[in-house]
Amino acid sequence: MIKGLAGLFAILAVLHATGQEPEKTDIFTANTDGFELFRIPGIVVTTKGTALAYCEARHDAHSDWGEIAVHMRRSTDGGRTWEKARQIAHMGERAEGNPRKKAGGEHEQTVNNPVAMVDRNGSVHFLYELNYARCFSMRSEDEGLTWTKPVEITAAFEGFRKACDWKVIATGPGHGIQLRSGRLVVPVWLAYGNVGDHSPSAAGTIYSDDHGRTWKAGDIAVPNAGAIGNPNETSIAELSDGRVMLNTRNVSKANRKLVTLSADGATGWAAPRFDDALWEPICMGSLLALPKPDTLLFACPHSLKLDPMGNEMPGKGGERKNLTLQLSRDNGNTWPVSKTLEEGRSAYSDLAIGPDGTIFCFYERDKRLTVARFTPGWLNQ
């Protein structure tokens, strides 16, 4: 019997090291629970190993505006099973108003761009937007079961006003991070055209040095200037040397993601550069620092628009399909490993890692939101 168990454990160890194919579970599906579509996935894993997957629940599938709520599902067994979905954000008095609609928008409430982050003290912080004009923060001390009353933190964005006279604000989407210093950092983007318009835009971060009690604006990290066109949705990671990396969606002729670095995640951002290895289909991508030193994981549809001769079409993006995972072992200088997670229609995603090393990719797959579970071994096969 002991020999049998030893053999089983040896097999399990080999499977974990080499990596089985990812296990995929659909946890939000279009046209269920009275919602036409679920979009904008985010996922974190708490200090105790609870996975929290959240998204926008949209009554209207065709617009970032409209009647939108934020829903969450919890898993306490490593993503194998998930509790029933529930609404978690802005449950009190409604604040209606949609400037994008000529009629009917005055009765719609848009609760959007949810972003969670895990504090090493055990708390989970959660930020969200209201009508792309106000930002709120709340906190859970019990693994996402209950949440504090939302506190408005829109005033933090006033710190950007001199550099960017914004009309629209948005967090993330995806997740924020806590730095080794204890600082909480959340990527944000701001649009400064007409009220309700999402361009022209710029990207930066807001941060908290007191465990989410107060928030401040950092510097504009990625401006809409020169060869850079309308930077917006941004993902974040802390590198093994303590620097903070932003990876930003944009509409530029280069057709590549923008990357910039800061020593503290808020100020002194380096000049943004286009990363030739990270294609830009004009779609949000996700970024995660793995426990192994210098190792980063990136997920995004790997697709570009080509002309009949097979040449890239500048500034045209690509189809939202072929969701691909790319691995860097040198803090994002090179990305030698590339593996397709989803060949078909796939778009936004978010990445997280559990205490046992299991990696989660929560992503848009056609009209579903799917959680894929896999090990680092699968990435390195």
Image (spheres, rainbow, N blue to C red):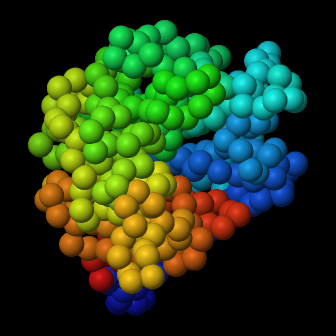
On screen, residue 92 versus residue 259, left or right, reads right
On screen, residue 289 versus residue 192, left or right, reads left
On screen, residue 95 versus residue 310, left or right, reads right
Looking at the image, which residue is at 51% across and 35% down?
199
Please identify the quarter of the rendering in which residue 95 is found: top right
Residue 55 is situated, as x and y percent measured from the top left of the image, at: 63, 45
Judging depth in this view, the residue of 252 and 53 nearest the camera is 252
Looking at the image, which residue is at 54% across and 20% down?
167
Residue 196 is situated, as x and y percent measured from the top left of the image, at: 63, 27
Residue 369 is situated, as x and y percent measured from the top left of the image, at: 64, 60
Above or below residue 378? Residue 36 is above
Please identify the quarter of the rendering in which residue 344 is found: bottom right
- Residue 246: tell me if it is visible: yes
Judging depth in this view, the residue of 256 and 214 nearest the camera is 256
Looking at the image, which residue is at 48% across and 66% down?
318
Residue 66 is situated, as x and y percent measured from the top left of the image, at: 76, 36
The quarter of the image holding the N terminus is bottom left
Above or below residue 347? Residue 158 is above
On screen, residue 75 versus residue 336, left or right, reads right
Looking at the image, which residue is at 58% across and 14% down?
151
